[in-house]
Amino acid sequence: MNGRNIKIDYLFGPSSATISACDVLADAGKSDHYPIKEHFEF
C-alpha cells in the first residue's frame, strides 16, 4: 500500500458466514478508496 496505513470500516456479508480471507488490491491512482476482495465460508 505504498507505506500508507488503511482502515477497513465495513465488510458486508451474511451473518452466518465467516471471512476466510481478505485482500486489499492495489489502488489505481491517488484515491483513498481501495477495492477489497473477500472470501466467505458458509
Image (cartoon, rainbow, N blue to C red):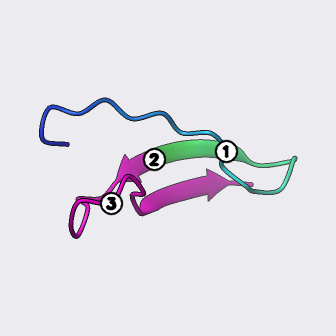
Q: Residues within 10 Å of mark 2 (few under 14, many from 20)?
A: few
**Residue occupied by mark 2:** 22
Q: Nearer the viewer, mark 3 or mark 2?
A: 3
- Position of the C terminus, as image quadrant, is bottom right
**Residue occupied by mark 3:** 31
Q: Residues within 10 Å of mark 1 (few under 14, many from 20)?
A: few
Label 3's element? loop
Residue at the (62%, 39%) spot, across then down: 9
Label 1's element? loop
- Spatial CA span between label 3 and label 1: 18 Å
- The residue range painted magenta reads 22-42
**Residue occupied by mark 1:** 10
- Spatial CA span between label 3 and label 2: 20 Å
Type of amino acid at the residue the image marks with label 1: Tyr
Residue at the (36%, 51%) spot, across then down: 24
| Left or right: residue 5 compared with residue 26 | right
Residue at the (77%, 49%) spot, across then down: 17
- Position of the N terminus, as image quadrant, is top left
- x, y percentage for residue 12? 73, 55
| Left or right: residue 8 compared with residue 31 | right
Asked if residue 27 lies in the magenta stretch, the reply is yes
Above or below 4: residue 29: below
Q: Nearer the viewer, residue 42 or 4?
A: 4
Query: Looking at the image, which residue sits at the far bottom?
Result: 28
- x, y percentage for residue 35? 41, 63
Count the labels in the image.
3
- Residue 30 numbered mark, or none: none
